[in-house]
Image: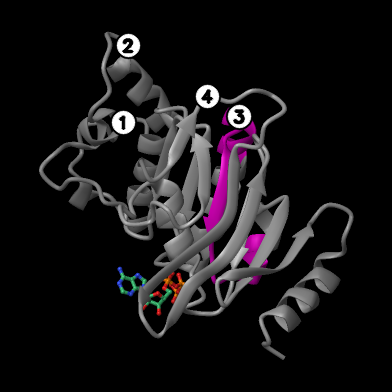
């Protein structure tokens, strides 16, 4: 199996990646011996210039890259949820049905309703996805992830398509949800300010390896921002 999944103990990292290599052609690797640990409950943002392998890493962790086997070690928790830039709600199912899709057990629907209430979509259970705004669709997508109580939440530019104000609202919501549910989070973003605002740690990926790995706590956001922009070679 490509990805090793397991239950977690308090002392183990939620995510452990060692010497991960991935290439898609003869001409060079996209991931070039990447190492990464994420602690349970830790929120890590992953930034890097376009094409540096962020989505490739996320797909490998999500188990969506079937050909990554044998290219390094990947350990992730048993329950992983993924949120993408588009909500990926099924258009032919109502919002609540999307949220609980695949869930079993008598309490599934009630848990779905609670998750929708948590993201501020109480009363929209029977709406169709097309009846929701872009931000509401992303909130439904977050509810669909969180109702599964993942130990790891992977998010690939989840707010990239939203306007600035909706984005800020989604930041506050995501922080609140993560504080309540405490999944480990890996958030891929192009937005340095989003990375600083949301995360405990920011990782800069460059040419498929970790170029910088910084803790946010205790650092001035202004100084951290300029350090990260330098690491991204944006001056
Ligand atoms: N399935 C694939 N087949 C061929 N090439 C791929 C595949 N997936 C990714 N690549 C290539 O790997 C490189 C890294 O892609 P990836 O999507 O991981 O970058 P990224 O850092 O997420 O970029 P961006 O910030 O632009 O989204 C790119 O050159 C891309 O074309």
Q: Tell me where the magenta segment starts and ends, as one range.
A: 176-195
Q: Position of residue 140 (x, y in %)?
A: 35, 42
Is 150 left or right of 233, judged from the image as shown? Answer: left
Q: Callout 2 environment at 10 Å: few (<14), some (14 to 19), or many (20+)?
A: few
Q: Nearer the viewer, mark 1 or mark 2?
A: 2
Q: Residue at x 29, y 33 (%)?
A: 99
Q: Of callouts 4 and 3, which one flags the residue occurring earlier in the amino acid sequence?
A: 4
In this view, which residue lies farthest toward the top? 106
Q: Is residue 134 in view?
A: yes
Q: Residue at x 48, y 70 (%)?
A: 53
Q: Of callouts 4 and 1, which one flags the residue occurring earlier in the amino acid sequence?
A: 4
Q: Nearer the viewer, mark 4 or mark 3?
A: 4
Is 161 left or right of 102, judged from the image as shown? Answer: right
- Which secondary structure, mark 3? helix
Q: Callout 3 environment at 10 Å: few (<14), some (14 to 19), or many (20+)?
A: few
- Residue 7 is labelled as 4
- Which secondary structure, mark 2? loop
Q: Of callouts 3 and 1, which one flags the residue occurring earlier in the amino acid sequence?
A: 1
Q: Position of residue 40 (x, y in %)?
A: 65, 34
- Where is 145 relative to 230, above or below? above
Tell me the distance, in whole angstroms, between the alpha carbons under discs 4 and 2. Answer: 23 Å
Q: Decide which of 229, 124 is in the foreground and name it.
A: 229
Is 145 left or right of 127, judged from the image as shown? Answer: right
Tell me the distance, in whole angstroms, between the alpha carbons under discs 2 and 3. Answer: 20 Å
- Which secondary structure, mark 4? loop
Image quarter in which the C terminus is found: bottom right
Label 1 belongs to which residue? Answer: 123
């Amino acid at each position: 199996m490509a990805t090793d999944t397991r239950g977690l103990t308090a002392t183990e990292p939620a995510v452990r990646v060692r010497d991960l290599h991935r290439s898609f052609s003869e001409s060079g690797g996209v991931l070039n011996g990447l190492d990464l640990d994420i602690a349970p409950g830790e929120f890590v943002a992953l930034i890097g210039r376009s094409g540096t392998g962020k989505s490739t890493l996320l797909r490998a962790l999500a188990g969506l890259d079937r050909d990554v086997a044998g290219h390094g070690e990947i350990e992730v928790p048993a329950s992983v949820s993924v949120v993408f830039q588009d909500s990926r709600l099924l258009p032919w199912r109502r919002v609540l049905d999307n949220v609980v899709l695949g869930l079993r057990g008598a309490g599934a629907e009630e848990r779905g309703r609670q998750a929708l209430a948590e993201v501020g979509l109480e009363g929209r259970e029977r709406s169709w996805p097309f009846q929701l705004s872009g931000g509401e669709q992303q909130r439904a997508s977050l509810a669909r992830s969180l109702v599964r109580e993942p130990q790891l939440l992977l998010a690939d530019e989840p707010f990239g398509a939203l306007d600035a104000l909706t984005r800020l609202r989604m930041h506050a919501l995501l922080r609140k949800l993560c504080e309540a549910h405490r999944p480990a989070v890996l958030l891929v973003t192009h937005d340095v300010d989003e990375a600083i605002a949301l995360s405990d740690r920011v990782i800069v990926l460059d040419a498929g390896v970790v170029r910088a790995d910084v803790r946010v706590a205790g650092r001035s956001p202004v100084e951290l921002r300029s350090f990260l922009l330098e690491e991204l070679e944006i001056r």
